[in-house]
Image (spheres, rainbow, N blue to C red):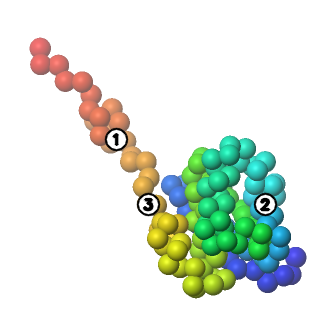
Amino acid sequence: MTQEFNYGTGRRKTATARTRLYSGTGKIVVNGRPYDEYFPRKSLQMIIRQPLALTKNIESFDIHVNVQGGGVRGQAEAVRHGISRALLEVDVEMRSSLKRAGFLTRDARKKERKKYGQRAARARFQYSKR
C-alpha cells in the first residue's frame, strides 16, 4: 500500500489511535478488522462515523486505524479524535464545523489515582467517633 494518506493521532483516557485516511469508498478498518466487527455496539459505531457524517465525507475515504490501550468506549472516542485530526489535513475548511462539534478537543479527563491513607481517590475510610 504505497498510496498517499493523511495521518491523525487521537487520544482518550489511556487509548491511543493512529489513523490514516486514504481516498477510497468509505471502508473503515480497525486493527485489521472491519470497524463494525471490532466495535459491535451501534453507539460506538456512530461515534466513529460522527466526524465523517458532519463533514459529508462518509464514502470519500478508506480509513485504517491502529488503536491500543483503554477500554472499548475510550478506544472509539480516540478513533473519532484521530479521524477528525486527519480530516483537518485533507481540508482546513472543515476546522470550524469540527471544532464546533468538539471533535478536535482532546478530552483530558482520566481516572484519578488512589491516595494512601484513603479508601479511594477521594473517599476516606469511615470515621468512628467512639
Where does label 2 land, which residue?
Answer: 29
The front one of 61 and 116 is 61
What's the residue at 60%, 68% (across, down)?
54
63 vs 3, left or right, is: left
Residue of label 1: 121
Instruction: Name the amino acid type tagged 2.
Output: Val
Q: Is the residue 27 above or below the residue 113 in the image?
A: below
Q: Is residue 79 visible?
A: no
Residue 15 falls left or right of residue 109: right
| Label 2: element kind | strand
In the image, is residue 59 above or below residue 77?
below
Q: Position of residue 39 (x, y in %)?
A: 71, 48
- Tell me if mark 2 has few (under 14), some (14-19) or many (20+) residues whose alpha carbon lies within 10 angstroms of its own: some
Q: Position of residue 25 (x, y in %)?
A: 83, 70
x and y, in percent, of residue 91 in the image: 63, 84
Q: Position of residue 22 (x, y in %)?
A: 78, 76
Q: Residues within 10 Å of mark 1 (few under 14, many from 20)?
A: few
* Residue at 43% across, 48% down: 111
First-in-chain label (1 vs 3): 3
Q: Amino acid at mark 3?
A: Ala
Kindly report the distance in space between the C-alpha atoms of the residues bearing marks 1 and 3: 17 Å
| Callouts 1 and 2 close, C-beta under 8 Å | no
> Which quarter of the rendered picture does the N terminus lie within?
bottom right
Query: In terms of sequence position, does the residue under pointer 3 or pointer 2 come before the other?
Result: 2
| Residue 130 in the image: above or below residue 62 | above
| Mark 3 neighbour density, 10 Å: few (under 14) some (14–19) many (20 or more) | few
Which residue appears farthest toward the right when viewing the image?
A: 1
Disc 1 residue type (three-letter): Ala
Please tell me the numbered disc located at residue 108.
3
Residue in view at x 67 percent, y 71 percent? 56
Q: Is residue 97 visible?
A: yes
Tag 3 secondary structure? loop
